[in-house]
């Protein structure tokens, strides 16, 4: 299976966008505007600094590249200049490019022509050391924290394991991926895209993944294991009135100890609960 870097070869990359967007993204990559939060063969997450930081996600979809960017205009699925910058930086950093010497020189540094001696090195400003190289291309893909160079000591320092075990892991969970199952997936996708207006990215073949508002998680006692998905609103009556105006029906509203709740009647017989909570809400 191809990696992300394989899917952002220059000729493929140019086919995803227009020349002006490509050149704008390349200029940002050349200027060092890209930092990586995750760098793997199947997924790359990066921050691209333009007028403000933008988050870019590049993934291997079914047979092609899938992407998303936090820039508002990119919710339409455009391969924007930030995606271009992250893609070019990914291609340059890929292990097979680094090992073969095909990676581009650092911004502002021209390659040395064959047969000529390299100029004397100029002492660079102090920076964090680069991650150590590995010999196997698959192993050379690195998962790193933003702006924190990874380290791989052969023997953990005394107490390191205990410190790691005591580290809170909440900050390492970057989100929640919820899934709805039903016999009419296109109808359900139309509801989230056209009725609720949620931004989405097409990961291939019309398979949409939607961005969601902030979420919360609760655990309830039960005899069987399972999961449930609820939409939440601060004003159930107003939200239902807006949905009814768009042709969405719902069940009767019920008053529970934890809030007012009903179910939206969606395509394929899917019933999606929505409620106005009366319980305290957590803060992240």
Image (cartoon, rainbow, N blue to C red):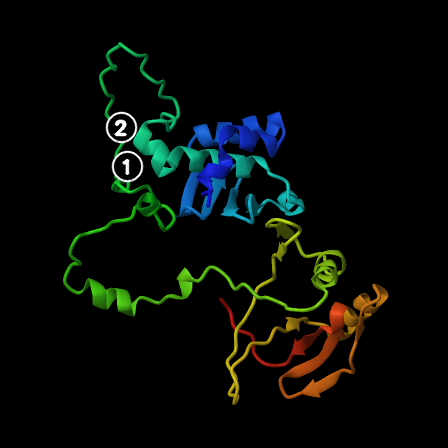
Residue lying at 56% horizontally and 43% vertically, measured from the top left: 64
Q: Can the viewer see residue 243?
A: yes
Residue lying at 41% horizontally and 66% vertically, measured from the top left: 170
Residue 119, position as x, y percentages in the image: 25, 14
- Calculate the distance from the C-alpha at mark 1 to the C-alpha at mark 2: 8 Å
For label 1, the residue is 127
Residue 58, position as x, y percentages in the image: 51, 45
**Mark 1, residues whose alpha carbon is within 10 Å: few (<14), some, or many (≥20)?**
few
Q: Can the viewer see residue 266?
A: no
**Element under disc 1:** loop
Residue 109, position as x, y percentages in the image: 35, 21
For label 2, the residue is 124
**Element under disc 2:** loop
Q: Is residue 119 left or right of residue 273?
A: left
Quarter of image, res 156: bottom left
Quarter of image, res 277: bottom right
Residue lying at 46% horizontally and 32% vertically, measured from the top left: 29
**Mark 2, residues whose alpha carbon is within 10 Å: few (<14), some, or many (≥20)?**
few
Name the one closer to the observer, 24 or 263: 263
Residue farthest toward the top in the current orientation of the protein: 115
Name the one closer to the observer, 64 or 208: 64
Residue 237, position as x, y percentages in the image: 78, 74
Q: Tell me the tag on residue 32.
A: none
Q: Are marks 1 and 2 in contact (CB under 8 Å)?
A: yes
**Above or below — where is 6 with respect to 187?**
above
Residue lying at 17% horizontally and 53% vertically, measured from the top left: 154
């Amino acid at each position: 299976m191809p990696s992300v870097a394989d899917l952002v070869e220059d000729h493929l990359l140019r086919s995803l966008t227009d020349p002006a967007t490509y050149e704008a993204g390349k200029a940002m990559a050349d200027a060092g505007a890209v930092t990586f939060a995750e760098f793997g063969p199947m997924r790359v997450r990066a921050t691209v600094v333009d007028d403000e930081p933008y988050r870019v996600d590049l993934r291997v979809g079914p047979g092609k590249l899938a992407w998303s960017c936090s820039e508002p205009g990119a919710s339409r699925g455009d391969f924007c200049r930030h995606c271009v910058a992250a893609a070019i930086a990914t291609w340059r950093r890929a292990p097979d490019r680094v090992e073969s010497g095909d990676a581009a020189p650092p911004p502002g540094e021209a390659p040395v022509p064959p047969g000529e001696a390299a100029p004397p090195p100029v002492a660079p400003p102090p920076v964090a050391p680069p991650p150590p190289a590995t010999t196997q291309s698959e192993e050379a893909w690195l998962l790193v924290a933003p702006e924190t160079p990874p380290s791989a000591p052969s023997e953990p320092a005394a107490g390191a394991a205990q410190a790691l075990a005591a580290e809170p892991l909440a900050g390492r969970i970057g989100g929640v991926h919820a899934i709805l199952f039903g016999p009419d997936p296109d109808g359900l996708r139309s509801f989230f895209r056209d009725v609720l207006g949620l931004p989405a990215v097409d990961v291939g073949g019309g398979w949409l993944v939607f961005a969601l508002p902030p979420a919360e998680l609760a655990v309830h006692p039960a005899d069987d294991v399972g999961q449930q998905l609820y939409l939440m609103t601060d004003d159930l009556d107003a939200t239902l009135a807006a949905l009814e105006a768009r042709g969405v029906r719902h069940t009767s509203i019920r008053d529970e100890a934890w809030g007012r709740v009903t179910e939206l009647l969606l395509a394929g017989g899917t019933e999606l609960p929505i409620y106005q909570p009366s319980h305290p809400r957590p803060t992240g």
